Image: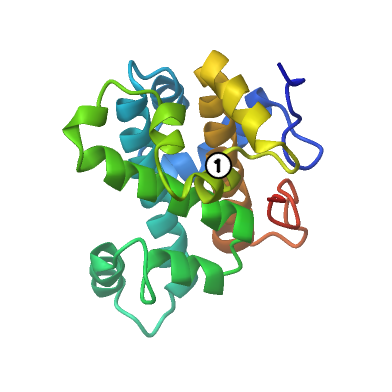
Amino acid sequence: MPERPKPKGDGPDFKWLMEESKHLASLIGVSSKQIFEIFKAGTDWEFIIKMDALLEAASKAVVKAALANEYLDADDMDEFVDALPMRGRTSILKLLQASGCGDAERNLIDSVRVLRNGFAHDITQMEMSLIDVIKGRKDRTTLLRGLCWIKEYEEAALIKMYEKDGGLFRFGIVSGALTFMIAAYHSVIKQPEDPVAIGPETPPAS
């Protein structure tokens, strides 16, 4: 089995990620306990659907903050953003890109949405593991790159590791989601003089 990979960047610990993500999580009405419960979900089907819902809510909160100004009615803007699709040319992901969201974070959000759609439209996958679902897809390389939150890896070895311990896969996805929430809060919503730098500067290597 390959050595357990290091997270992207220098890797702040999970406790720190959970604590710092509270700022944005509180704005969307999600507690740290609820995020941990998502991580511990009984099936990967439940995990990915709830993770997608978390990322969608966080993404929309970031976009609303980025678009907010004194000339636009807040309620109308909220309604407009809530009606946007997550993916596509005129989407939440495109607006996240325009607001400065990094490639790695957007790829994670997009990959979770792709898997969520796959799970939602195929009831036979409800009891399957996340890695088994991905292995059967033509876009598995793209999905693994977006989800694993690892800079450098060998795909076959990574798959074997996740087959042995699916919790590691979930851990990487949750870590990436929390990283997005922290970075987005500090760069778009709070707008400090010195933004917190915690994620990779470049997307993971293929």
Residue that mark 1 sits on: 144
Residue under the image location 73 percent in, 21 percent down: 4
Is residue 163 shown above or below 175? above
Any part of residue 23 in sight: yes
Kind of residue at badge 1: Leu
Instruction: Residue at the far right: name it.
Output: 10
Query: Which percent across, then down, holds residue 94?
Result: 46, 71
- In the picture provided, is 36 more to the left or to the right than 104? left
Residue under the image location 46 percent in, 71 percent down: 95
Instruction: Residue at the far bottom: name it.
Output: 71
Q: Could you say which is closer to the camera, residue 199 or residue 19?
A: 199
Quadrant of the rendering where the N terminus is positioned? top right
Query: Which percent across, then down, holds residue 192?
Result: 69, 59
Residue under the image location 53 percent in, 33 percent down: 174
Any part of residue 165 in sight: no
Is residue 99 shown above or below 7? below
Q: Quadrant of residue 135?
A: top left
Q: How many marks?
A: 1
Q: Could you say which is closer to the camera, residue 2 or residue 63?
A: 2
- In the picture provided, is 83 more to the left or to the right than 51? left
- In the picture provided, is 4 more to the left or to the right than 186? right
Q: Quadrant of residue 52?
A: top left
Is residue 18 shown above or below 78? above
Helix, strand or loop under label 1: helix
Query: Which percent across, then down, holds residue 61?
Result: 41, 56
Mark 1 packing: few (<14 Cα in 10 Å), some, or many (20+)? many
Is residue 103 shown above or below 51? below
- In the picture provided, is 172 more to the left or to the right than 58? right
Query: Which percent across, then down, holds residue 147?
Result: 54, 41
Residue under the image location 38 percent in, 85 percent down: 71
Indicate the colouring scheme: rainbow
